[in-house]
Image: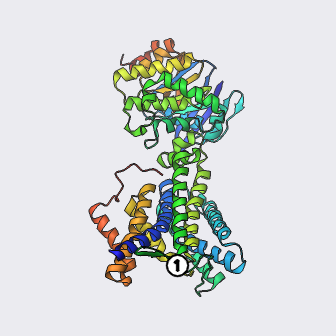
Amino acid sequence: MLQVEGVTVRYGHVAAVREATLRVEAGELVTLIGANGAGKSTLLKAISGLLPLAAGEIRFEGRSLGNASARAVLTAGIAHCPEGRRVFPQLTVRENLDMGAYLRRDRVAVASDLREVFALFPRLEERRAQAAGTLSGGEQQMLAIARALMSRPKLMLFDEPSLGLAPTLVERTFEIVAEIRRRGTTVLMVEQNALAALGMCDRSYLLETGRIVQHGTGDEMLANPHIQKAYLGG
Amino acid sequence: MDQFLQHIVNGTILGGTYALLGIGLTLIFGIMRVVNFTHGELYAFGAYMAYLLVQVLQVNFFLSLVLAAALGVALGALIEFVLLRRLRGADIDTVMLVMIGAGIALQNFWQLAFSGVAKSINHPFPNLPLVFGPVSVAPIRIFVIIVAIALLIGFYLLINRTRIGVAMRASFQDPDVAALMGVNIPLMRTLTFGLGSGLAAIAGALLGPIFVVTPTMGDLVALKAFAIVILGGLGNIVGATIGGFVLGIVEEFGAGYISSGYRDAMGFLLIIVVLAFKPQGLFAAKERIG
């Protein structure tokens, strides 16, 4: 479904991601793990069209996304749930969700997706008229996920969905990611919490200083001595 | 007391056009983070276009106002497209210098094209004031305030109730994430600058028939628009609306009770007082909307 081939992304002269190659098949839940600053978020932003590629190629469903705009990537069916939630604080919950469906013209289907999203996150329905900035951190994360779902993506990119949340909410967030995949959306998730990320995924990639250094199924990665030592506290 | 009411009415009428200028400027600042030094020139442009259409081309007065506003939107969009789009990511000093230069160029162009002689614009309203008890108002001024209020309401609805308005506010709050939602940010910037400029142009076209039209008419008005934006809190549309009316009324009181020579000073005095006691602006604590 998604092929990233030899992608390099630079900030000025610094290459944050170097020659990264990965793939995600339809229906999979793939995670991208690694330490802070390893280039995980940068790679996601490059896929979403927020950062230009210095080299390499990104293909989605066989079509090149080259240096496509964020708008074109979204239209192709990739939604990005950004790091740190990034809800629009002064828009209401409902307006945030409307922004998620900004490019869609099929009003009837949008209305039914909105009902579905509210069924998944009843708290958001209760708070639909409230400014998003007044929500708790957990609620904001739910809103960020719901907003991304409103574009009805084929592939959903999650950037550190558990960041800064209380432990019970972290668990709940991962349950939701799993649920989204169960409902048929392919998932590529960046996550610092390697244990959780490896436990729930089909396959995973490990990024270190901008390079993909390991790759395998969740179980293979969990069993890898280097990963155990560096990322699982073993 | 009779005079008091008269001042309130005059101040409100003036304030309506100040509010139009203020929300145009605050919208551009809020969404684009650009301090628009051409705002006063767009105001003069609106007045000159009204002059050109009404006096020279003999176009219907009301149609001329609509056309002047539309031309203001077009000129604003052009300025954004030609100058600001190339300056994305440039530092704020560079952008300011370019905008100041553009303002100087535009003002001199008005002088070149229309000469320095003040122009007046005829309007179809009777000159005899309407008398309501102690208050008397020229019909053209009633027309101006009605149009201003209608535009303010329309603009408020556009920003708060439409898809494009929600996208504008989202772009203001987080342009990167708005782009992730599929918002065409460069287009949004052009649109915003055009709309803000159109509001300045219609303010000029509305006041042109009341005052006279000169190449430098935008100078003082631009300063006042900045004052309104500061008063209302940067980027706050409701604040700028209220700020416009407050400034209009304060100026009227200053002119009426102290001396008409102090009219323009009153507004700035007010700004100094507000900034001394509430430097974030009167409405900064409230939610910013635009």
Q: Residue furthest left?
A: B277
* Residue at 42% over, 74% down: B135
- Please state the horizontal and vertical placement of residue A171, each as a whole percent of the image: 40, 19
Q: Residues within 10 Å of mark 1 (few under 14, many from 20)?
A: many
Nearest the eye: A234 or A138: A138
Q: Hey, which quadrant is residue A230 in on the image?
A: top left
Q: Which residue is mark 1?
A: B217
* Residue at 51% over, 78% down: B129
* Residue at 46% over, 39% down: A92
Nearest the eye: A16 or A130: A130
- Please state the horizontal and vertical placement of residue B201, each as a whole percent of the image: 58, 68
Where the N terminus of chain B falls, by quadrant? bottom left
- Please state the horizontal and vertical placement of residue A46, each as a whole percent of the image: 57, 37
Please say which color scheme the image uses.
rainbow
* Above or below for B32 versus B20: above
* Residue at 60% over, 64% down: B76
- Kindly tell me whether residue A188 is visible in this rendering: no
Q: Hey, which quadrant is residue B202 in on the image?
A: bottom right
- Please state the horizontal and vertical placement of residue A177, each as a whole percent of the image: 50, 21
Chain of the residue that carries numbered disc 1 in the rendered image: B
Q: How many marks on residues?
A: 1
- Disc 1 element: helix
> Could you tell me the amino acid type at mark 1?
Met
- Kindly tell me whether residue B134 is visible in this rendering: yes
Nearest the eye: B181 or A116: A116
* Above or below for A122 versus A9: above
Q: Residue furthest front?
A: B133
Nearest the eye: A233 or B183: B183
* Above or below for B38 versus B284: below
